[in-house]
Amino acid sequence: MNAPTTQPISIEALKKKIGSVIGISSWHVVTQDMIDRFAEVTSDHQFIHVDPVRAKIETPFGGTIAHGYLMLSLIAPMSYEALPQIEGRAMGINYGLDKVRFLAPVRAGSRVRAQFKLKEVITRSQQEVLLKNEVTIEIDGTDKPAVYAETLSVIVLK
C-alpha cells in the first residue's frame, strides 16, 4: 500500500478538518489465504474462518468469514495510503481504540476499504499530537459496514 501523494498538512490546517472525512483507502480483497494466515498467527482456527465447506453448510454466511480482529488490523495499512501526511511528523504511534464494533461479516473474497473521519486533534506537547479518527470499514456492494472503530494515534513531531 502506498503513502498518500498529497502535500503534507500542518496541525493547524488539520484541526480545521475536524468533523470531515480526511481519507478513504482503495479497495482491498480479503482472501481465504489472508484469513488462513491470520488464523495461523493468532491460533484462532474456528471453522467459520478456515473451513469453507463446513462454513457453507453450517452457517448463514454462505462460506467463511474474516476474523473481526483481522479486519481491525487492516486499519493500519489502509491508513498509510488514505491519511494525509502531517508536516513535521517524525513518526506515528498506535495509541489505542475508544470504541470498536464488528457490524457485518466479511466473506472471503470480499472487497473492503476504510473511510477515516477526523474526530479530534489534541496537542499534548510541542512534540506530540493525539488524533482521534472514526474509521468505518465498508464492504463493497453492501450497505452495512463491517467495522466501526474510533482509533487513537499519537503523532510525534520533529
Image (cartoon, helix red, strand yellow):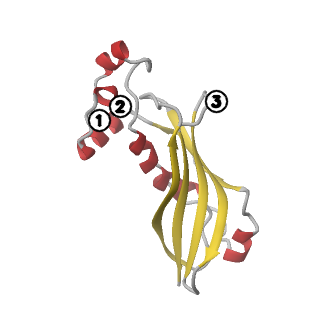
Q: CA distance from mark 1 to mark 2?
A: 6 Å
Whether the residues at callouts 1 and 2 have beta carbons within 8 Å, the answer is: yes
Residue plotted at (31% across, 42% down):
38
Residue at 63% x, 74% y: name it: 122
Relative to 58, say whether 70 is above or below.
below
Q: Earlier in the sequence, mark 2 or mark 3?
A: 2
Query: How many angstroms separate mark 1 from mark 3 (CA)?
Result: 26 Å
Secondary structure under tag 2 reads helix
In percent of width and height, residue 22 lies at: 67, 57
Q: Which residue is mark 1?
A: 36
The residue carrying mark 2 is 32
Residue at the far front: name it.
Answer: 99
Where residue 96 appears, as percent x and y from the top left, is: 46, 62
Secondary structure, mark 1, is helix
| Residue at x 39% of width, y 20% of height | 63
How far, Cα to Cα, is label 2 from label 3?
Answer: 22 Å
Disc 3, SS: loop
Q: Is residue 43 above or below residue 116?
A: above
Which marked residue is nearer to the observer: mark 1 or mark 3?
Answer: 3
* Label 1 or label 3, whichever comes before in sequence order: 1
The kind of residue tagged 3 is Asp
Judged from this view, the residue extending furthest toward the right is: 16
Callout 1 amino acid: Asp
Q: Is 147 situated above or below 62?
A: below
Residue for badge 3? 143
Are dots 2 and 3 in contact, CB under 8 Å? Answer: no
